[in-house]
């Protein structure tokens, strides 16, 4: 029986066919693009907008390329019908040449031979900035309007924040957001339950940050449970009645540190070049190599020998399904409250003391990257087969606390 569900293959093919027929007007315009190519090259493509990590990551990298392209090149874009964040859509539309008609140009450009030169590929497949575009072209990233800055700061002041006070965004992944998405209800997201974490294990670190005079904002949408704290400097923004798309973007884009389990929205902090602490995540191969970031993955232990996996074994066992960890004989151990506290102290102290301690383990960091760069899995996953996609940020590193607790990790 043919399925008419919006996520079915038949429905998607039918939709594409209807758009092709409906967009036959685009054929002469595509041919004109071919004709004027010697004078001006028009490139067309989309910015993925259905998931916040891809939406922000793709737009950030495309913005960098848009302002660094050769003369005689014009780029046009289109967005998907449904976008995941209205504020980011507004910012993209006021900074990019976005036209809904471009979708039809893209369709016919694909089916009329000779269109490769006009295809502007998206960076959203994995949203990894392995060409270092953000770092090399980060000046003037999509700016907030003055009234947007005022609105966001007014909200913070109502919480007790004062201008100049540091604040941290904390994003702890659980299954609630994906489970709540009606457009994704056909999928069983349990296959990557290994990525989830227990919010309670972060409380000790949150209290420590608050004790240092740092505001902590727990971020997210449709989260499972609230924070168990009465500390006035710990704000459970995810459960706030006045949470908004503007605040989602502004807070991540202006925080002093983003602490995340690699959940998507942290890409906002990434494109705005905020320091990142990525912890309690797997697989290690997905660590952020193109930004100022500290990584502390979940602990992996062989069930048979009870020994911790080495770095090479982490990379060789790049697994994306919970049940496959079980089949491989690997036990996943989440970070303890004390582990999280220790790495949060490490990250904040590097910000506070202007990275004075980073050189204390430079030999270990260099050894780490030497092993990683020799891994075929890592090279493939980060598209390093392309000669221009080999950027490693000098401040991207594995946590020194993690290395201290895992003495044989680099063997």
Image: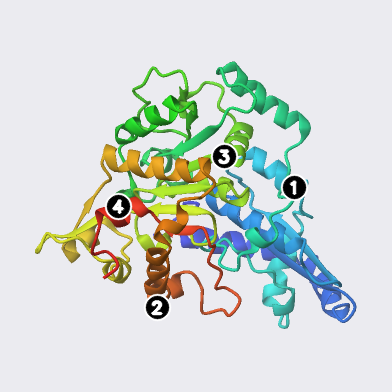
Dot placed on the residue nearer the N-terminal end, 1 or 4: 1
Whether label 2 touches label 4, CB < 8 Å: no
> Counting other residues with Cα less than 10 Å from the Cα at mark 2, is it few (<14), some (14-19), or many (20 or more)?
few
Q: Secondary structure at mark 2?
A: loop
- Separation (CA) of disc 1 from disc 4: 38 Å
Residue 151, x across and y down, in percent: 69, 25
Where is mark 3, residue-wise?
A: 252
- Separation (CA) of disc 2 from disc 1: 41 Å
Q: Secondary structure at mark 4?
A: loop
Residue 270, x across and y down, in percent: 57, 50
- Separation (CA) of disc 3 from disc 2: 33 Å
Q: Which mark is residue 93?
A: 1
Where is mark 4, residue-wise?
A: 298
Whether label 1 touches label 4, CB < 8 Å: no
- Separation (CA) of disc 3 from disc 4: 24 Å
**Quadrant hosting residue 116:** bottom right
Q: Is residue 190 left or right of residue 123?
A: left
Residue 325, x across and y down, in percent: 23, 60
Q: Secondary structure at mark 1?
A: helix
Query: Which residue lies at the image location 70% right of the left edge and 72% below the top edge?
Result: 119
Residue 204, x across and y down, in percent: 32, 31
């Amino acid at each position: 029986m043919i399925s008419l569900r919006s996520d079915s293959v038949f429905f998607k093919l039918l939709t594409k066919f209807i758009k092709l027929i409906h967009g036959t007007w685009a054929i002469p315009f595509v041919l004109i693009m071919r004709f004027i190519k010697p004078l001006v090259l028009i490139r067309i493509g989309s910015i993925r907008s259905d998931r916040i990590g891809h939406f922000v990551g793709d737009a950030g990298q495309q913005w960098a390329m848009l302002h660094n392209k050769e003369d005689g090149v014009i780029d046009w874009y289109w967005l998907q019908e449904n976008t995941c964040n209205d504020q980011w859509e507004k910012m993209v539309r006021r900074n990019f040449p976005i036209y809904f008609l471009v979708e039809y140009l893209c369709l016919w450009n694909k089916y009329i031979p000779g269109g490769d030169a006009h295809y502007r590929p998206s960076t959203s497949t994995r949203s990894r900035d392995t060409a270092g575009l953000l770092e090399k072209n980060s000046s003037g990233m999509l700016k907030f309007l003055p009234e947007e800055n005022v609105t966001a700061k007014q909200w913070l002041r109502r919480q007790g924040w004062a201008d100049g006070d540091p604040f941290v965004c904390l994003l702890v992944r659980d299954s609630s957001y994906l489970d709540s998405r009606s457009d994704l209800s056909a999928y069983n997201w349990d296959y990557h339950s290994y990525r989830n974490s227990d919010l309670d294990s972060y409380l000790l670190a949150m209290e420590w940050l608050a004790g240092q005079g740092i505001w902590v904002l727990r971020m997210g949408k449709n989260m499972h449970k609230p924070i168990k704290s009465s500390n006035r400097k710990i704000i459970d923004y995810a459960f706030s009645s006045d949470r908004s798309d503007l605040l989602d973007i502004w807070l991540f884009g202006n925080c002093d540190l983003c602490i995340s389990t690699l959940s998507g929205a942290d890409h906002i902090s990434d494109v705005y070049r905020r320091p990142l602490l990525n912890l309690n995540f797997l697989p290690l191969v997905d660590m952020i190599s193109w930004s100022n970031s500290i990584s502390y993955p979940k602990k992996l232990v062989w069930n048979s020998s009870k020994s911790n996996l080495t770095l090479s074994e982490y990379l060789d066992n790049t697994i994306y399904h919970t049940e496959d960890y079980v089949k491989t004989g690997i036990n996943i151990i989440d970070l303890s409250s004390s582990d999280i506290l220790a790495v949060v102290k490490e990250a904040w102290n590097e910000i506070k003391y202007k990275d004075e301690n980073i050189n204390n383990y430079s030999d270990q960091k260099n050894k780490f990257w030497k092993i990683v760069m020799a891994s075929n899995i890592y090279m493939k996953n980060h598209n390093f087969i392309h000669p221009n996609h080999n950027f490693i940020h000098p401040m991207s590193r594995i946590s020194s606390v993690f290395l201290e607790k895992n003495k044989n990790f680099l063997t």
